[in-house]
Image: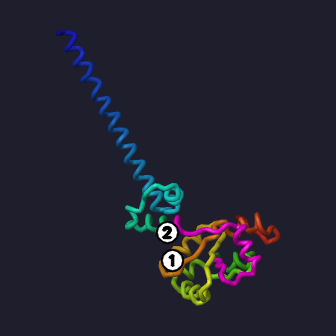
Amino acid sequence: MKNTLENQLTQTKQRPSKKLWLYGVGVALALGAFGALAAVRHNPDLLIPVIKAGVPVKWASNVGFVDYAIKRAETPQISAQELKQLIDSKDKNYLILDVRTPEEYKLSHIPGSVLVPLTEIEAGSGIQKVKSMLNGRRLIAYCTHGYRSGVALVRLQEAGVEGIQYSGGIKEWTEKIDPSLPRNNW
């Protein structure tokens, strides 16, 4: 009997520490989830690799930043080599859109590209410019690294304009295709 009572007392003493440990893990998971949600809400592009890896997030597409990330992840891409081949082929069935600032465009740009800064696209006036220049041609957008062109393509898509992204941007273009172009301090 004494042995059983000692066992019960020992078990009772162990339970609170197990409960505290479980509570601690629960709090840590909740804080981690909250922190991840805050980070993704601040920068929805953090979701793109998750979406491309096949994690189903469509159920949350009614949340603005998740919907944006889904659209960014589903935007068609073109490589530097494919874009170079397209330019070399003299095919005129496309419009290359640079969405950087006028200063950046003046420094260097992909040959044949036209400038419509992201700020104009976000303001709405740039959307009309792009629509008027397309005339049935395919749209290919780029910037420096790929962020602004992705944002521009989502905004254009919301206005009914589909496009392809060259996410390598002018930085990759000057490294892989045309090193003679002036480089900014990227």
Figure quadrant of the C terminus: bottom right
Q: Does residue 76 show up magenta in the picture? A: yes
Of residues 155 and 58, the one drawn nearer to the viewer in this rendering: 58
Task: Answer with left or right where residue 181 lies relative to residue 14.
Answer: right
- Nearer-N-terminus badge (2/1): 2
Of residues 40 and 20, the one drawn nearer to the viewer in this rendering: 40
Classify mark 2: residues with Cα within 10 Å, few (<14), some (14-19) or many (20+).
many
Q: Is residue 18 above or below residue 96?
A: above
Among the 4 quarters of the image, the one containing residue 78: bottom right
Of residues 51 and 64, the one drawn nearer to the viewer in this rendering: 51
Tell me the residue at 37%/39% (across/down): 25
Judging by the rendered image, the residue that carries numbered circle 1 is 157
Q: Does residue 7 show up magenta in the picture? A: no
Task: Answer with left or right where residue 91 lies relative to residue 51.
Answer: right
Q: Position of residue 119 (x, y in %)?
A: 57, 79
Disc 2 and disc 1: Cα gap in Å? 9 Å
Asked if the residue at tag 1 contacts the one at tag 2, i.e. Cβ–Cβ closer than 8 Å, the answer is yes
Q: Position of residue 80 (x, y in %)?
A: 70, 67
Q: Position of residue 46 (x, y in %)?
A: 52, 58
- Going by the numbered disc 1, the residue's amino acid type is Gln
- Going by the numbered disc 2, the residue's amino acid type is Lys
Task: Answer with left or right where residue 23 lies relative to residue 113.
Answer: left
In the structure shown, which secondary structural element does the residue marked by tag 2 occupy?
helix
Tell me the residue at 62%/75% (across/down): 141
In the structure shown, which secondary structural element does the residue marked by tag 1 occupy?
helix
- The region drawn magenta spans 71-99
Task: Answer with left or right where residue 151 lies relative to residue 175.
Answer: left
Judging by the rendered image, the residue that carries numbered circle 2 is 71
